[in-house]
Image: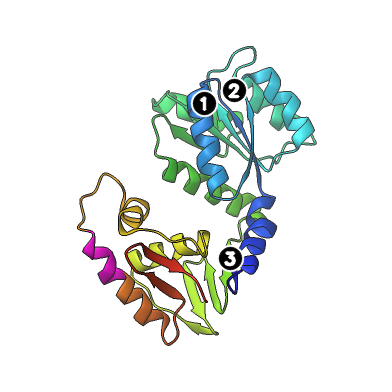
Amino acid sequence: MPQGVGAAASVRRAVVMSAKILVVEDDDALATLVEYNLSKEGFRVTKAADGEEAILLIDEVEPDLVLLDWMLPKVSGVEVCRRVRASQKTRTLPVIMMTARGEEADRVRGLDTGADDYVVKPFAMSELTARVRAVLRRVRPGLTEDVARYGDIVMDRVAHRVRRDGRDVHLGPTEYRLLDHFMRHPGRVFSREQLLDAVWGSDVYVEARTVDVHIGRLRRALGENDPIRTVRAAGYALDAD
C-alpha cells in the first residue's frame, strides 16, 4: 500500500462518516441520487419513502440531520417536522426541507414549522451537499470536520486549506480540486479524460492537454518530491511510491 493511503482513508471514516443523514423522499430515483452523492461525500445515509417510516427511523437510527420532502404519503413532511420539534428527544435535530414549492409563503411556512433550511427542487447536488454541511457546521460543528491526510499532505476541506510538512501550500481553484480528487482516491490512476470529467465537469469542453498544465502547477506548488505520479499512456495518480 502506498504511504499515506491507510491514513487518508481512516481519517475520513473516523471524522466525516460520523454524520448520519436520513433522506425522506417518496421519489425513489431522487432519493437514490441524493443517497449516492451524500455517501460519496462520506456521510452515512438511510432512506425513508413516507412520513410514517421517517418517524420510526428517526427514533431507531437517531440521525444527525434529516432531509425531508414536503409532500409525503401517509404523514406530510410538515407534520413530521412538527413532531420532531415537539419531542424532547429530537427538538434540536437539524431538518432541511426539500420541496417543489418555491413560493415565499411556502418557504416561510416550512421555516416556521421548525426547519433549519429549505431547498427548492430541482436543485444541484453540490448545492444540497453545501447546505447539509452548513447546517451541520452551525448546529453540530463537531460533525463537520473534514480533514484528509496523505503522507505529509494535510487537506482541511472546511477551511479550504492545504499544508505539506507543516507549511502552507497555495493552490489555485483548479489545482485544489485536482488534489482533492486524488486524495479521495489515493493510488488510483486517472486518465486525462477522467480528470476532465471529475474536476472540470462533463458538460464543459476543455482540451485534454489542459490537464497537463494544471498537474504541472500542482506539482510545483507541492514542491520537491511531490507524490503525483505520471503513468505513461495512462494518466496520473497520487502515489508516494
- Secondary structure mostly seen in magenta is helix
- The percent coordinates of residue 18 (x first, y second) are 69, 51
Determine which residue is flagged by label 1: 109
- Distance from the alpha carbon under mark 2 to that under mark 1: 9 Å
The image quadrant that residue 114 belongs to is top right
Query: Which residue is depicted at the point 44% across and 66% down?
Result: 237
Disc 2, disc 1: CB below 8 Å? Answer: yes
Tag 2: amino acid: Val
Q: CA distance from mark 2 to mark 3?
A: 35 Å
Judge from the rendering whether residue 56 lies leftward or rightward of residue 38; answer left or right.
right
Which residue lies at the image location 55% right of the left edge and 20% below the top edge? 26
Quarter of the image that includes the N terminus: bottom right
List x then y, in percent, for residue 79: 64, 20
Q: What range is drawn magenta here? A: 208-214
- Which of the pair 31/152 is nearer the observer? 152
Element at badge 3?
strand
Q: Is residue 218 above or below residue 79?
A: below
Per the image, label 1 sits on a secondary structure element best described as: helix
Vertical placement of residue 24 versus 43, above or below: above
Q: Which residue is mark 2?
A: 78
